[in-house]
Each structure stands twice: as C-alpha cells, then as structure tokens.
Image (cartoon, rainbow, N blue to C red):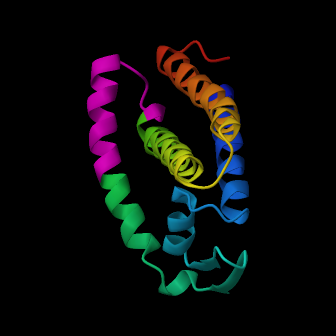
Amino acid sequence: MSKVFTYMMMALSIMLVMTFLGLHTGFTDILSIVGFSYDNSTGTISSVGVQTSTIYLTLLAILTVAVGSSILIGFITKSSSENYVLLPFVIGTLFLFVQTFTGIMGSVISGDYPGWMAAVVVTIFLPITIGLLISLAEWFRGTDN
C-alpha cells in the first residue's frame, strides 16, 4: 500500500501547487466543496467555512457509490476487505489527477503558451499517472511491498 500512497501524495501535491499557481484544476472545486474560498486571480484563500460547506453530504454520496462499486470490484478481483474502504479514496484521487491533467493541457493548448509547454506538462503528469496505475494493479494483486 505504500507505493499507492506515495503516488497519491505526489499527485495531490502537484494538484495543490498547480491550483495555487492560478490554473483552474479539479482541486479548485474540491477546495470550494471543503469550504475554502479560493480566488484564482489573486491566489489567496479569502475565507474558510467548513461548517457551512456541503462536504458531509458529498462525502456520504461518494462513499455510498464507492462502497457499492468497490464491493463489486473486490468480488471480481478477490481482494481483501481492507481494499473496500480505501478504494474510493484512491480512485477519487486518480480521477481528480486526470481531471487536473486534462484541465492544464486544455489551458496550455488554448492559451498563448509556446508549443514545448505541452510537452513539459505531459512529461510531469504522465509518468506519475502511469506509476499510480501500476501501483494500483500491484495493490489489488497483493504484491505491493
């Protein structure tokens, strides 16, 4: 499980840095769901309202759907019951990372950036995405050391 969490922390760190650099990523939406009012133009967090956010209802809905799908995946792959609990968070991070990657690529392609900038973004994001997918496969097979 350590490889999966290592890749997850790398992905979350890159997403947070890209958000604070002013790029609209999927992490911007997560910050607003949690209750942080983040302004992309100034790069500041203007308010924190975790109590008034919809995070609890959102987490309940995500957890309900994820547990159902993880039970199905666990039944198919014959994995342990620990995976049922951790799978929603791992898959959610993977989807958020892919959404961030596509959002940044869309910004780079449509903006006034030089052509080599897209290659730099792919060079940063693609190896981490592939590494996360490989470590997920090892995790489900039980060979993740």
Q: Is residue 50 found inside the magenta-colored segment of the image?
A: no
The image position of residue 24, as x and y in percent, is 57, 62
Q: Relative to 16, is 96 on the left or the right? A: left
The one nearer the camera, 107 or 53, is 107
Q: Relative to 114, is 75 on the left or the right? A: left
Vertical position of residue 17 compared to residue 130: above or below: below
Vertical position of residue 60 compared to residue 144: above or below: below
Give the residue at x 29% y 50%: 65
The image position of residue 89, as x and y in percent, is 50, 46
The image position of residue 124, as x and y in percent, is 70, 34
Location of the C terminus (image quadrant): top right
Q: Is residue 70 found inside the magenta-colored segment of the image?
A: yes
Asked where in the image residue 134 lies, by quadrant, the reply is top right
Start-end of magenta stretch: 65-83
The one nearer the camera, 77 or 10, is 10
The image position of residue 144, as x and y in percent, is 62, 17
Give the residue at x 63% y 77%: 38
Location of the N terminus (image quadrant): top right
The one nearer the camera, 56 or 119, is 119
